[in-house]
Image: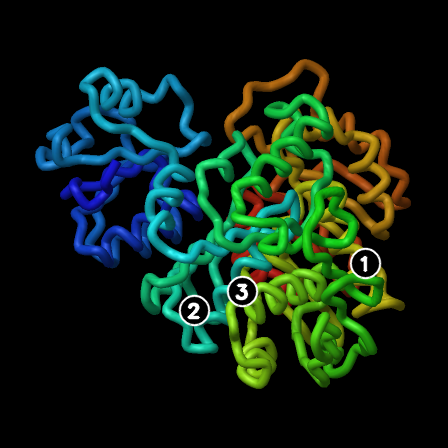
Amino acid sequence: MNIKSFENIYFIGIGGIGMSALAKYFHAQQKQVSGYDKTASAITTSLASLGIKIAFKDAIESIEAPYLNPEKTLVITTPAIPKTSTLLKTFKIRNFKVIKRAEALGLITNNTKCLAVGGTHGKTTTTSILGHLMFECDQKVTAFFGGISENYKSNLIQNGSAITVVEADEFDRSFLSLKPHLACITSIDADHLDIYGTKANLIDAFQAFSNLLPSSDKLFVHASVPIPGITYAVEAPADFTAVNVIIKNGGYVFDLKTPGQTIENLKFFMPGKHNLSNAVAALAMALACGCNPLKLSAALKSYKGVERRFSYKIKNDSFVFIDDYAHHPKEIDAVWEAVSEMYPQKKVTVVFQPHLYSRTLDFTEDFAVSLSKFDAVLLLDIYPAREAPIAGVTSDLLLQKITAQTKQLVKKSALVTAITSIGNPVLITMGAGDIGQEVEPLTKNLMYA
């Protein structure tokens, strides 16, 4: 299929972080772009500012006349959209070409040098670091991010089309739609078991992803990943590894040891060894693309991060507020390690919103262990996303297993009161649901509390 043959692109779920990046891309390609989403958000507002019209009603009358021609309109959807969607069913009944977001990415990247970042954790940060490095090294790159880059205030970089940088999403086996030239796998931890059933099946899917590459020397893997490739790590044996790591001025200073050289005195201002590991992966891929080490050093130092990835909202001598997207026990552990490294003597309150009933059920014990490391735990109700409730699976089920001295269920409306009554000097909000919408109000209310 040739995307260029379509005049119009209609997105069902246009407000999603990945979908909105594609919408911006096609808008820049002079396509007519429109779409639907369930609710208005900062993302839909930013799309509307570009002149992209968005409907918030799942009904056929929401579709403007130019998009009702199946010969001229390509429809892009996402697994987050239920099969019962009126718009989705209407487009299919009327024989429109309907493809998933991952298929669209695959078509876009087909005629480019595709750099794909896979892994159960770290995709967005690694992709955004890599996209930033390539841009700063003057590469002709288009990069799609699963988050808003602090450097570009966008989830899309466009500086040419010779190279594309994309996240290789394992959910629903989406990453098998890509044709990567170079790839990395940051981690393979059990997740999306509602899709895969077992971790073994998940590993098989990542193996299938790695088989899409022209050869094994085009794959970079974290040293813990059980798939052959060029290895990377932090202060551990690997082909690419960060060594002589010290913390200075709120960031890392380190040397990068590669198979052919050692690049000294690199600076990276994102807390957490997991983020430093992501930086090593991005550096290795950028070096494989021929980027200059001196330019890479300057580019890495200027990297500012991604919204909701250990994002500082308040940072002063008496109070620190950090927001993070962590929604899996391993990600929570990584946040704990980062905050412990940066604030070793301070008590920490975490506000966590579980994401998905199935994930909460699959990892109840692991979530409890991870969250119990914090001094105080405030749990919101489970965010269901695409799922129907599962009997007996609630935030209270998780709360009962948490052993932190201070713990409670809390409604969003009572967050400020609960946080201030506990009074710990470090606060972290975590989760992949709509907890992100509470961050700015919390920031304003806590700034002067």
Instruction: State the CA–CA distance, disc 2 to disc 1.
Output: 28 Å
Disc sitting over residue 428 in the figure: none
- Where is residue 52? Give x, y as percent: 22, 50
Residue under the image location 46 percent in, 77 percent down? 136
Q: Residues within 10 Å of mark 3 (few under 14, many from 20)?
A: many
Question: Mark 2 or mark 3: which is in front?
Answer: 3
Identify the secondary structure beneath mark 1: helix
> CB of mark 2 within 8 Å of CB of mark 3?
no
- The residue closer to the viewer here, 168 or 445, is 168
The residue where tag 2 is placed is: 152
Residue under the image location 79 percent in, 77 percent down? 247
**Three-letter code, disc 2:** Tyr
Q: Earlier in the sequence, mark 2 or mark 1?
A: 2
The residue where tag 1 is placed is: 337
Identify the secondary structure beneath mark 2: loop
394 versus 127 height, above or below: above
- Where is residue 229? Give x, y as percent: 68, 51
- The residue closer to the viewer here, 397 or 248, is 248
Asked if residue 313 can be seen in this view, the reply is no
Please tell me in which quadrant of the rendered image residue 423 appears. Answer: bottom right
Identify the secondary structure beneath mark 3: helix
